[in-house]
Amino acid sequence: SPTASASFDLRRYWTSLIAAVETELDAAMPMRPPETIHSAMRHAVLPGGGKDGAAKRAPPVLCVAACELLGAPRAAALPAAAALEMLHAASLVHDDLPCFDAAPTRRGRPSTHAAYGTDMAVLAGDALFPLAYTHVVAHTPCPDPVPHAVLLRVLSELARAVGSTGMAAGQFLDLAGATALGESEVMQVLTKKFGEMAECSAACGAMLGGAGPDEEAALRRYGRTIGVLYELVDDIRSASGNGKMRSNASVLRALGMERALGIVEELKAQAKTEADRFGDKYGDRVLPLYSFVDYAADRGFELQDAAARP
Amino acid sequence: ATAAASATTEFDFKSYMGERAASVNRALDAAIPAGDPPAALHEAMRYALLAGGKRVRPALCLAACGIAGGREAWAMPPAAAVEMVHTMSLVHDDLPCMDDDDLRRGKPTCHVVFGEPIAVLAGDALLSLAFRHMASVDSYPPDVDPEKHPARVVRAIGELARCIGSEGLVAGQVVDLEMTGSTETVPLERLEYIHLHKTAALLEASVVVDDILDVTKSSEELGKTAGKDLASDKTTYPKLLGLDKSREFAEKLLCDATEQLEGFDKEKAAPLLHLANYIAYRQN
């Protein structure tokens, strides 16, 4: 329902969440010896003052929103939300390496290898992956309200999402030049590189919030759709000159602008259909899910402004 | 008591290790089905993981579960996970931007065969697989205690993640990198820090021996480029202490490790005791 969606202040919701996630991340990576590696890890994860502004933290927001939809406390999902950001950052650090995308910048600042050297960037990624699991194990309130068996499923899901059939598969297909091929290959790269992480975010929130199997499945589909939508809109915006600097230009070349815009509409409709399943049972708590779809599609506000004025 | 004592002396360490290596290899083989898409990425992971090696770390994990009164099969997923993590650290260590090694266990390294980006990805994917494999209920035999099992595995995952992170394995690699090529004399504590973090506890002895072998053995015997550590001006125990002193140090570590086992049942402790001896005195 578009009217209800408009009445929900996603910007305020997102801003308060980002502040909580930043605090959690900052505390999870104190400076300690050996200082170089911890400094590199902090550089990779914490936003700093780059010209592209604060990190948007979409995976943590999805995770917490899914958990809160089910009426569970935010505290149950926050450690996993921070872990998602660590895993995401670790993948990006390795994706930026000279042997991959050779990206000199990330979020408007030098990429981790540009600032700390290639060897240290490899190790920063290698250390961020396990830190994510350490963080979840050490900080998730367990066994109450999160039972050990649920925590295990969350850990397995986190590892699956960044593994050889998840995000790493997307990076592999991208390397292999799949985005230069047809629509189905391009959509597969987007699904693996961006959909898996978003699906995992929503799925972890669902598990931590005590979702039943059908609810978890719906939230997985919702998350996956949002992840692809979010990235495709990024690519469209940068192709039209008002988005971020770097993008998958080949995605737009392969799809064509008209088809890309058509897919955006399809994804929006799909995500809203999934969110609709929760409206009857959870009422207004479904509003963050609706407004997230609109934000992913339209970017109606700039989050860096929001983050600057908490 | 006599039976236990004779069981200890007659303990056939060689076949014990052979059997463990075979069962660990079966578990690793099953954990990455060949041909699953993306096939080339899984092939690179299998290439690195199934390249051989004595599987000392998983054997330690299995033996430690046994001495604590568990079935070894219960510890197979963590044992396999430890080997995946170990392999991942080797694949990344060998990269051109790190130690730049062309040979590992007598075979071309992962990046030589598959290219640098795939080697980075294969390492990352092995690390993820380790935790996924260890966390998944499906990895374990059906006779684990359904009440106690989840909490135990959560603890073990926390432990593994802590040991390989920025205050464990990676810390060792960082200090190792920072020391390599440095002209200042490296203090012994610094070197101990590197090895303590890169391998931890009982396996520290293993690394001391590794360094000794690196100087005295040829490439074929070692399955890796001999003298590599010295050639790259990497600080090693033999370079710092001399060969004899390094051996003495290894013996002292062995004594420490053996002392840790004194409180346990002799028969159950036999595998761990032999493992410690093996690590300290092996020739390759």
Image (cartoon, rainbow, N blue to C red):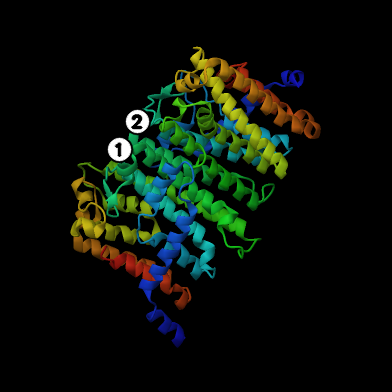
Taking B267 as reference, is B233 above or below it? above
Taking A237 as reference, is B215 above or below it? below
Q: Relative to residue B1, is residue A78 drawn left or right? A: right
| Count of marks, rendered view | 2
Taking A68 as reference, is A302 above or below it? above
Instruction: Examine the image and state in which quarter residue A177 appears.
Output: top left
Please name the residue shown 22% across and 49% down the image: B228
Would you name the residue on which mark 1 appears? Answer: B97
Residue B231, position as x, y percentages in the image: 18, 47
Q: Tell me whether the residue at label 1 lies in contact with that at label 2, contact meaning CB atoms closer than 8 angstroms.
A: yes
Amino acid type for the residue under numbered disc 2: Pro
Q: Relative to residue B144, is residue A69 drawn left or right? A: right
Instruction: Examine the image and state in which quarter residue A115 appears.
Output: top left
Residue A180, position as x, y percentages in the image: 44, 25
Would you name the residue on which mark 2 appears? Answer: A98
Q: Mark 2 lies on which chain?
A: A
Q: Relative to residue A41, is residue A161 drawn left or right? A: right
Q: Residues within 10 Å of mark 2 (few under 14, many from 20)?
A: some
Please name the residue shown 61% across and 16% down the image: A301
Residue A37, position as x, y percentages in the image: 39, 38
